[in-house]
């Protein structure tokens, strides 16, 4: 082997070693999932499964409670505004498409840490109608301070009757 070939070989090796270094987010993701013992792939959230766009928002459960599904990603929450009825249990399910975020509901004690690879769950209930800001409380990058959503709580009789497969959101109000 002459020096020229050896040099080409070593350079190629170096470049191949550098590729994983630029992809550490993707490599990090299964590790986070493993540590939290969970099973959702943050890279395919939009394509299939519980967190596809048509399934986000507020779902009416058979027992009268509601389930809210959201995605946190740099630098927004989807949906931007959540609509729930007052006086019924709210099951919140959130996951992250990228970094670690934290969904806080201002003026309440509710705060949920949202990790890529796992589904964060919380049980909420609001006695009265009202409107709350829901900012991200975990520094997640340059757009962190603009990352927020809203929660609108309406009286039970003002919450729309949702058919199977239908999801409530603020635009319906
Ligand atoms: Cu998301 Cu800070």
Image (cartoon, grey):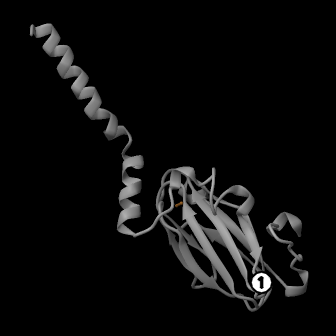
Q: Is residue 127 above or below residue 81?
A: below
10 Å crowding of disc 1: few (<14), some (14-19), many (20+): few
Q: Nearer the viewer, residue 171 or 68?
A: 68
Tell me: 110 left or right of 16.
Answer: right
Residue in the image at 69% along x and 77% along y = 67
97 on left or right of 167: left
- Considering the image in quadrants, where does the C terminus appear? bottom right
Q: Secondary structure at mark 1?
A: loop
Residue 149 percent coordinates (x, y): 68, 65
Quadrant where the N terminus sits is top left
Number of numbered labels in the structure image = 1
The residue under the point 89% across, 77% down is 161
Q: Taking 10 as reference, is 163 left or right? A: right
Quarter where residue 106 is shown:
bottom right
Residue 31: percent from left, percent from top: 35, 58
Occupied quadrant, residue 8: top left
Question: Mark 1 highlights which residue?
Answer: 62
Across and down, in percent, residue 134 comes to: 64, 70
The answer to whether 35 is drawn above or below residue 1 in the figure is below
Residue drawn at 64 percent across, 65 percent down = 70
Q: Report the front residue among 61 and 115.
A: 61
Vertical placement of 44 versus 150: above or below?
above
Residue 107 image-quadrant placement: bottom right
Q: Nearer the viewer, residue 44 or 81?
A: 44
Q: Is residue 139 left or right of residue 107?
A: left
**Residue 84 position within the rendered picture, expressed as x and y whole percent measured from the top left:** 77, 78
């Amino acid at each position: 082997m002459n020096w020229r070939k050896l040099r080409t070989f070593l350079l190629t090796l170096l470049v191949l070693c550098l590729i994983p270094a630029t992809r550490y987010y993707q490599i990090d993701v299964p590790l986070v999932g493993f540590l939290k013992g969970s099973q959702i792939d943050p890279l395919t959230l939009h394509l299939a499964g519980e967190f596809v766009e048509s399934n986000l928002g507020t779902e009416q459960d058979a027992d009268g409670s509601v389930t809210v599904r959201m995605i946190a990603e740099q630098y927004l929450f989807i949906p931007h505004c959540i609509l729930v009825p007052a006086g019924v249990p709210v099951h919140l399910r959130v996951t992250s498409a990228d970094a670690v975020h934290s969904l806080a509901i201002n003026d309440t004690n509710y705060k949920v840490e949202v990790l890529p690879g796992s589904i964060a769950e919380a049980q909420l209930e609001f006695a009265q109608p009202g409107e709350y800001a829901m900012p991200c409380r975990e520094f997640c990058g340059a757009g962190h301070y603009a990352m927020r959503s809203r929660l609108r709580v309406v009286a039970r009789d003002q919450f729309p009757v949702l058919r199977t497969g239908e999801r409530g959101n603020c635009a319906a109000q």
